[in-house]
Amino acid sequence: MRVDENVAAGSDSYYAAAKKNYPASVSGRLRTIKWSVLIITLGIYYLLPFIRWDRGPDAPGQAVLIDMAGRKAYFFGIEIWPQEVYYLTGLLVLASVALFLMNAVAGRVWCGYLCPQTVWTDLYFAVERWFEGDRRDRILMDRAPMSAGKLARKAGKHVVWLLIAVGTGGAWVLYFGDAPTIIRDIFTGNAAPIVYIWIGILTFTTYSLAGFMREQVCLYMCPWPRIQAALTDEWALNVTYRTDRGEPRMSVRTGARAKAAGAEVGDCIDCKACVQVCPTGVDIREGMQLGCIQCGLCIDACDTVMKKVGREPGLIGYDTDMNIARRSEGKPPIYRIVRPRTVLYAALIVIIGGVMAYTLAHRAFQGVSVLHDRNPLYVNLSDGGTRNGYTMRLINKRPHERHFALTVSGLPDGFTVEAQGVASAGGKPVIEVPADTTRELRVLVMVPGGAALPESTPINFYIVDTDNGEKASASDFFKAAPTN
Amino acid sequence: MAHEDIDKVTGVATTGHEWDGIKELNNPLPRWWLWVFYATIVFAVGYVFVYPAVPLVTSYSKGLLGYSQRASALDETAAGQAARAEVGKGLANASLEEIKNDPKMLEFAMAQGRAAFGDNCAPCHGSGATGSKGYPNLQDDDWLWGGTLADIEQTITVGVRSTSPDTRMNDMPRFGADGLLDAKQVRNVAGYVLSLSGSSVKGADVEAGKQIFVENCTSCHGEDAKGIQELGAPNLTDKVWLYGGDEESVIYTVTHAHRGVMPTWGGKLDPVTIKSLAIYVHDLGGGT
């Protein structure tokens, strides 16, 4: 981020050109972690749709699938119906609380390691480095006039970028259908237009956001940095430059001279390695700031330099401003991970996760809903009896056909229940519901003449699986003519 | 507009704008943001040319694609009709029983029947098919002219006392108004009729009424007064009364008779629609 510099340099415009970053390569502990996270997360994203999961002959055999046409979502052994979309809400709530917890423990872990924008941009940087060399080579090449070699390297980079982008969109659509079939259809030109449209959209966003927009996304588009600023506290670990150790910064040679003269010398040799490796181009030595995604690459860079000049590593590290203050007062640094907010967030995660797991484990595989006829509310029959009509929907979430016996309670003896188009056994209609689907039908409840009925009687409908006795119920009312 | 005015606290230049000592810092927007803004303008201009956009005096600019929501709606309607035509053809050749037993045709017929009922039948029989005084309730289990699928289809096709030559038709005499029975006799026969369903008429001699019923009414309503559907003669022993089952209404009916009319729908509605209506109406009350 060079915004401040541009303005300080006397820019008289209200708009500033984004300055291109040339992050240098770096190696170290955090870089290794970042590579591992990149491989794991991208591996999951690209390969997950290919994992198979046997659900029997009538259900899709893909482990993770969002079946738009069938209105169902599958995640390994879990099958989510549209009316259970609250599980998605629960997941989103869990995800946000997990982000809060990450933030309270170690700052912008999400931004630095897990965010798709970070991961794909990191991958694009790797490709760029492979084709165009490290920071210095890239800067020189961009300044140099166009040549065959430059063109070839640039073209190579963009081709690979585009391939990754197409692959990103291509993997996305695999989550919405049978992956091998979709891949075959894509290459034979038989896939639905929406498939190509989505691949196009994600190719465009991946290519432009990871290839060109990069840190601009974090700085100007993403709301999360702003939200995190409100979530953090003085205990949260952040990538921190230890001003107490580093200042006054000076080169090794100047430092040696100053030391000899008895002056105070900081550990920072002002080599700017931390700035050069930064993917967003910030100077961490200016303190915690919006542009810092806390990927920790400057920690690796600084540690490498410190090692080289024979000083103790950790000049930049995961630390807190509070500890910097304590150290300069001669107190030992402290860090408390168990704090009211971390406990609260962890408790929320456990509670919400527990409730979700419990309801998921105990959810019913059948359901019934009943809707009373609006018009007419009741029908007077020739024998003086009363009939009410209902629209009933039965849900069978099991992968095989089931039979449900329908009973009604709450009415005086002598009433009859009839489900249209369904045969009755022992006075109860037995309704057949095919595998993994719902069935809607009309149900008529008749109370014979002579029974004194109030205008409205609460009644319950029960469906019971004739094989295993699993139940579901719904309540409604039985309406009768006003008694006056 | 070079401003050398630097804010002391932030070290950032100001725009030179000042309100009561409050200065606006110049933290410049990224330039690509401006380009995105220009791109939306270009997009809007393109949109104006490609899609209908500008109202003219008697028309509007049609756009290069010639798109219109009306045309696309018509296309979709035509596509829908084409898709339905096949099932509709199946309905034309199938018998009512076949339709009733084929889930796909049944669904189609029910949907078409419901729509046709709303368009054609609801004005008299009500949107819920419950009818009203003089207009039969089609939800209940009492059918004047028969409640089988075939009976209902026939009634819809020819109507009742309609202009069709095949119309369903009967003619109850105006016993009181035409002097066939005197007021006392009317009251007695009304008393007998209502006694069949457990009600009574004040001051009526039920035994005398029964005698009058046997002499005058059984030819149409039957000796047991349960009516004869072939003649459209209602069952007088049940609790369903088309023209009211209270004392006054029954006396009025015996005195003046009623001659309700239902139009013939054959020729106005195509046979497939009538079939669908029959299926729908039959389904309302669960059939007989």
Image (cartoon, grey):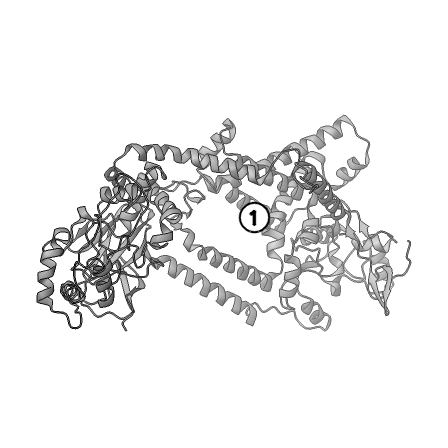
Q: Is residue A446 visible?
A: no
- Say left or right for A344 vs B91: right
The residue under the point 60% across, 40% down is: A201
- Say left or right for A288 vs A258: left
Looking at the image, which is closer to me, B142 or A45?
A: B142
Indicate the position of residue A147 as horizontal and vertical percent values.
78, 28
Q: Is residue B84 visible?
A: yes
The C terminus of chain A lies in quadrant: bottom left
Is A184 drawn above or below residue A278 in the view shown?
above
The kind of residue tagged 1 is: Val
Neighbour tally class for label 1: few under 14, some 14-19, many 20 plus, Cα within 10 Å: some
Tag count: 1
- Say left or right for B46 vs A366: right
Q: Chain of mark 1?
A: A
Choose top left, top right, bottom left or bottom right for residue A211.
Answer: top right
Looking at the image, which is closer to me, A374 or A434?
A: A374
Choose top left, top right, bottom left or bottom right for residue A293.
Answer: bottom right
Per the image, the residue denoted by label 1 is A37
Indicate the position of residue B55 as horizontal and vertical percent values.
69, 43
Indicate the position of residue B59 as horizontal and vertical percent values.
67, 39
Choose top left, top right, bottom left or bottom right for residue A4.
Answer: bottom right
Is A433 drawn above or below residue A471 in the view shown?
above
Is B77 drawn above or below residue A393 in the view shown?
above
The residue under the point 70% across, 69% down is: A327
Looking at the image, which is closer to me, A92 or B252?
A: B252
Looking at the image, which is closer to me, A127 or B17?
A: B17
Indicate the position of residue A206 as horizontal and vertical percent values.
62, 41
Is A2 drawn above or below residue A128 in the view shown?
below
- Say left or right for A248 vs B90: right
Q: For the residue labelled by badge 1, is the local secondary structure a helix, a strand or a loop?
A: helix
